[in-house]
Image: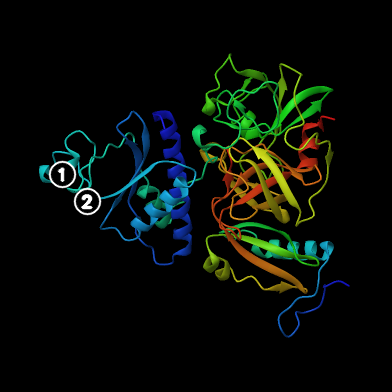
Amino acid sequence: MDRDEARQAKAHALAVARELIEKDVQASTSGVPAPRLSVGLAPRGDGRYGVALRYRRDVPGVRDLARRVADEIGEVGTAVDVRRTGRIRPLGDDPGTGGAGGPGNGVGTEPGTGPVTDLGGTRIGTDLGAATGGDAPPVPGPRPPVVTAQALGETGRVRPLRPGVSIAHVDVTAGTLGAFVLVGGVVHALSNYHVLAGSPAARPGDTVLQPGPADGGRAPRDRVGTLARVVPLAPGRTAVVDAAVALLDEQDVDPTYPVGRITRTARALGGETVGKVGRTTAVTTGVVTAIELDDVVVGYGEELGNLRFDDQIEIEGAGRLPFSRGGDSGSLVYRQDGVALGLLFAGSETGGDNGRGLTYVNPIDAVLEALDATLLA
Amino acid sequence: MGAAGRAPDRRGRCAVADLDEARRAKDEIKAALAGRDGVAGVGIAPEADGYGVLVRVLGDDASARRLGVPASVHGVSVHVRPTGPIAARG
């Protein structure tokens, strides 16, 4: 990975670690002290980078945490460098602990652990300490998209536009173009509010890029349209949909990928086999495990906080794979017979019978009604 | 035949509930759990021949057990299952 890709992978590793820690804290009744795990970038000597995971050998539980994080992010091909450290002190505090890391590497390590360079590494033990201390837990933000190099879906520039490609507001990272819809008889791109707007500060007319900025999209070169209509999200207000549309500059699009034109909608009944095409995990298959879910608490970060959603659809990936990952937001979810059921917007990294996380989807009829839109016939 | 008003049999099995019965049971469970920490969602889960209620709980199986939700409401099965924190898939 180059440095930018590695930074994205690092953000992913941090998110996974935080989630695993939160899960362990919730499962614990004994107030276990915070594991100390540092996450940074590890240069590989050829100008490329991996993700560095560093744990203190004298802290219970952190070795297992490091292994689980490494397993999770390594599964998508991220190069991971896991090492234990001794107590970390500022260099010069105790010259005897500088060890093989040498001067200027940012951390002191035990002899034999090899050189360590932590480029902006973030210590996450502080977050866990807050959670165990009875303070309000940190509000998880939108799951960052999996780094471009590891995404299985379409992260490049695609014209004419088609469902499943990377797209985002100019100030957002990247999500997925779910479908084409007609609003007032004009073709628009459908995705999530948090993909096409991303913030209450967004305004109609803001630039929308394909691919999204996290995949290298830049204005004005990759502009495909402008933010046109949103269903606003607001703190403290229960929502049903996370949706927005972008007015496209070019009306010539390919709505047939990957299963032909999807023009009909239905309400999920539960148990259906479904599919989607997303920017990160491409085409996946899953099963509807629940319908009409209320009070689904979804993290939107510090600005919007935790928002509640009613009437949601829950999906689990088929086999041993997750149905979605970060960056798949905005994907259209459809039945095997090509009928649309929902708009993918959220998920967990753990849970479900296969342990690979659960995906949450807005009912498509509510999405289209809120935007006064219809699927492109 | 519906499940409303019938207790589970001696083996703890519930009668088959239809969607409307599951909705009524869901509303009761939802009201009972209102404001409880760790509840990540209350919905309806498909079963082999009908529907039950699904409660998603942040944490693991132990967290789910600690919630103390009954195994059935008016003869409708109630399943309590863990999940990790849910976040927007940016």
Callouts 1 and 2 close, C-beta under 8 Å: yes
Label 1 sits on what residue type?
Gly
Task: Answer left or right for A109 relative to A233.
Answer: left
Mark in the foreground, 1 or 2: 1
Residue lying at 47% horizontally and 49% vertically, measured from the top left: A72
Chain letter for the residue marked with disc 1 in the picture: A
Question: Could you say where residue A331 lies in the image, as x and y percent from the top left?
Answer: 68, 38
Label 2 sits on what residue type?
Gly
Is residue A311 something that shows in the picture? no
Residue A76 position (above or below residue B29): above
Give the labeled residue for mark 2.
A86
Residue A79 position (above or below residue A319): above
Task: Answer left or right for B8 relative to A282.
Answer: right
Badge 1 element? helix
Q: Nearer the viewer, residue A359 or A194?
A: A359
Residue lying at 62% horizontally and 23% vertically, measured from the top left: A210
Residue A63 position (above or below residue A249): below
Q: The N terminus of chain A is located in which quarter?
A: top left
